[in-house]
Image (spheres, grey):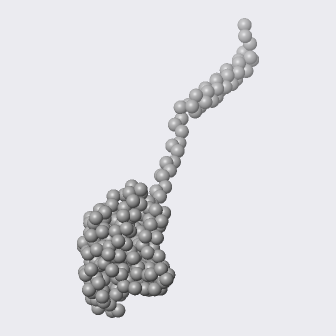
Amino acid sequence: MTSRAHLPWRRLGLVALAIAGTLIALVTGAGAASPSTTPAASPTVAPVSVPAQPETMLVIGDSYSSYYGDRHSRYPGWWAMLATDLGLEPQLDAMGGTGFLSRSSSCAHTRFKARLDTVRAVDPRILMIEGGRNDWRRCTRDGRVVEATRTEIERATDGFFAELAGVWDELGHPRAEVYVMTPWGTTKARKGRIIRPIVQAAAERYGFSWVDTESLTLAQAPDGIHPNNDGSRFLRDQVLQNSDLADRFPRV
């Protein structure tokens, strides 16, 4: 028979066993629940958007282009205004007094033909050819300036566009993406009536886009040749009105 004196100790032992069992169950339950806990979601990182570089508009020309600066200058050129309107990056290769035939009054500069390497190197989205105003003259081999004949102007202009057509085809661009213009002021108007049709005929013969421009007035070109700010804006407007550029680049 069990003594009554042993009963309290037995009860204490049973209580201790019950407490230990409860602790084991709690620890086991917590350990089993851990693997099923949903991990915190990783933060989503949005890809960095890199703005596309603007495409290039290359301008080959004479003083109608070379005498003027970019859109933020005091005297922005027609080409700078046009490029801004079209959302293009302008690049200029222009020299005063030069042309398809002319090498300037000092015979020190290059004709347009020498700038075809620039066309190859830049590989522009569109190409603007601005010139012809100076081609009433040419340089002799001994460096003298003489008046050019119609035949000499035609030969030089056709030769330039023939070579340009080959370069442009190599680059894989449609020829219609070359735009040709011959701005004119009030001086030497008779020569303008001869030269401008020659340039137009040669450009269109090779599939390039001719851009017709009205002659600048004295209010737009006070020296009879070079545009002031109003004249440059006028030339820009003429290009947009008399070509398909505004439709092709709808930022305008």
Q: Is 143 above or below relative to 26?
A: below
Q: Residue at x 48, y 52 (%)?
A: 47
Q: Residue at x 51, y 48 (%)?
A: 43
Q: Residue at x 28, y 82 (%)?
A: 192
- Residue 55 seen: no
Residue 61: x and y, percent? 40, 76
Residue 172: x and y, percent? 39, 55
| 3 relative position to 30: left or right | right
Residue 218: x and y, percent? 29, 91
Q: Quadrant of the C terminus?
A: bottom left
Q: Is 206 above or below relative to 39?
A: below
Q: Is 44 above or below relative to 192?
A: above
Q: How many marks?
A: 0
- Residue 180 seen: yes
Q: Is 82 above or below relative to 74?
A: above
| 233 relative position to 140: left or right | left
Quarter of the image holding residue 130?
bottom left
Q: Residue at x 50, y 50 (%)?
A: 45
